[in-house]
Amino acid sequence: MNTRIETLNPETTTGEAKELFDAVNNKLGFIPNLIKVFGNSPATLKSYLSLGELTSSGNFSNKFREQLALAIAEENACNYCLSAHTAIGKMNGLSEEQTEQSRLGFSGDAKQQAGLKFAKEVTRNRGQVTSESIKAVKEAGYNDGDILEIILNVVSNSLTNYVNHIAETEIDFPEVKSGQFAILN
């Protein structure tokens, strides 16, 4: 595999990275290529896994967190994460239409749409959002804690998006590409 950052082989990996790989394998039943890249830095892999645990312990449902991940991945043009979160989103009840709408920051639910739109804006503007944007997301029903959780999801997903861009991680999910939509266009 010719990537810019090595994709480790779990069979030959040792030490802390191997222990982390085993934990991921026990939880998921496989080790995604992103994890194999993160394994080059056990500290980074542990940070990623910790961020995942923290986001899942928050106020948002798995389904909405997948919608956020799709919106952020589309904004950051990360094909690996779009592919992964399309598959994971389906496992969490997202239809193909909901998946594509989420990527664009849309939802049939006004509150979810406000959260997706805010996440895309935070991502696009690297956190520089207007007071009007914060007012709009609050008027949609989000409180200060929810806004911080949206930002946590942006940070967690942007970490994976950036690593995938830099490493050129080989996609090991059914491939989805940024900017391409089957239903909405």
Image (cartoon, rainbow, N blue to C red):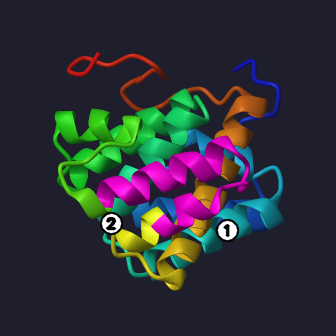
The picture places residue 78, in percent across and down from the top left corner, at 58, 32
Q: Is residue 29 above or below residue 7?
A: below
Name the element at disc 2. helix
Residue 99 visible within the image:
yes
Q: Which mark is residue 69?
A: none
> What residue is rendered at 23% in x and 51% in y?
91
Q: What whole-number distance in Å separates the C-alpha atoms at marks 1 and 2?
A: 26 Å
Quadrant containing the N terminus in the rendered view: top right
Within-10-Å neighbours for mark 2: few <14, some 14–19, many 20+? some
Q: Main secondary structure of the magenta part?
A: helix
The quadrant where residue 141 appears: bottom left
Quadrant containing the C terminus in the rendered view: top left
Instruction: Give left or right: position of 93 versus 82.
Output: left
Instruction: Give left or right: position of 87 versus 25.
Output: left
The quadrant where residue 21 appears: bottom right
> What residue is rendered at 44% in x and 49% in y?
117
Which residue is at the front of the view, 170 or 70? 70
> What residue is rendered at 34% in x and 39% in y?
86
Q: Which residue is mark 1?
A: 19
Is residue 18 rendered magenta in the image? no
Which residue is at the front of the view, 89 or 27? 89
What amino acid is found at the position of numbered circle 2 in the picture? Answer: Asn
Q: Which residue is mark 2?
A: 62
Q: Is residue 150 above or below residue 4?
A: below
Name the element at disc 1. helix
Within-10-Å neighbours for mark 1: few <14, some 14–19, many 20+? some
Task: Write the start and end of the magenta stretch as one range.
Answer: 112-135
The picture places residue 13, in percent across and down from the top left corner, at 74, 51
Looking at marks 1 and 2 on the same chain, the residue that comes earlier in the sequence is marked by 1
Is residue 129 rendered magenta in the image? yes
The picture places residue 124, in percent across and down from the top left corner, at 64, 41
